[in-house]
Image (cartoon, rainbow, N blue to C red):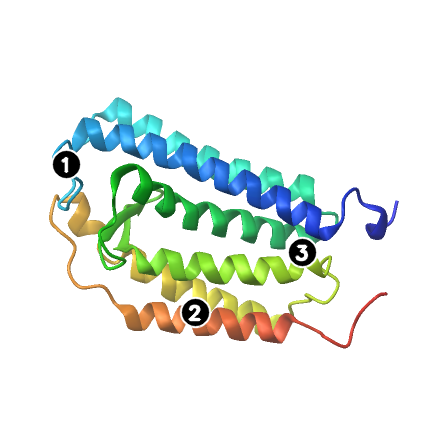
Amino acid sequence: MGAESFPGSPAQRLGWTAALAVAFAYVEAAVVAYLRALYYPEGFAFPVKPIDPTHLGIELGREAATIVMLGSVAMLGGRRAAERFGIFAVAFGLWDLFYYVWLKLLLDWPASLTDWDLLFLIPAPWSAPVVAPCAVALLLTLGGALIVLDRGRRFRPGALSWIAALGGTAATLYSFLEQAGAIARGDPPRSYRYGLLAVGLVLYLVAFARAWRPGEDEG
């Protein structure tokens, strides 16, 4: 069976990926709504409150399971490696974006895109204003959608693309993890380095532009 005969058109696979991401974003937001009702009945704010060790273990497991689920969707939804990456990017990006959409509808939070959020806990607390993960998620969604609609045929990253992507990831992750020590100590986060986020986003765009080969279509 060739790549062209893989079940479902690219648009159909993209649609089902989007449906799963949006639905799972609701599940994620519902869990966070319960956690905030338990730990932040007056409303979420930094510094973060100590969490029960049992609840912390469950939360770490939930985060790991989320990544496994998104990866599994990508493996099932694409035949080429590039197409699987595109599906993963769309699933991850829409999941993250709609997580905040659902939180806004459920809790009327965040009040603005500059509100700080606790993003992730593995391997240390990630934190940033909401606009930062949303910017990364939007870029993932758009780039991933292009790859999926093209069936991954023209997305062929070379050495320079990998270097730029790794550089972008390093800059972005550092901007998210810079406050990890302060948060672990129970301190509020300080100012966010938007410059690092900008560098990361630009490097991601460079990586994608270098990887896209518009003249190389297998037909």
Give the mark nearest the N terminus, 3 or 2.
3
Instruction: Tell me, for residue 41, which label it has, or none.
Output: none
- The type of residue carrying mark 2 is Leu
Q: Which residue is mark 1?
A: 49
Where is residue 133? Give x, y as percent. Answer: 37, 56
Please tell me which of labels 3 and 1 falls first in the chain: 1
Q: Is residue 177 visible?
A: yes
Q: What label does residue 148 carry, if any?
A: 3
Write down the quadrant of residue 57 in the picture: top left
> Pointer 2: what residue?
201
Front of the two marks 3 and 2: 3
Residue at 65% across / 60% down in the picture?
A: 147
Q: Is 157 or 40 nearer to us in this picture?
A: 40
**Callout 1 amino acid:** Lys
Left or right: residue 75 compared with residue 190: right
Please provide percent x and percent y for residue 166: 49, 65
Q: Please say if 179 is above or below 193.
A: above
* Distance from Cα at disc 3 to Cα at disc 1: 41 Å
Say which element carries label 2.
Answer: helix
Residue under the image location 52 percent in, 42 percent down: 21
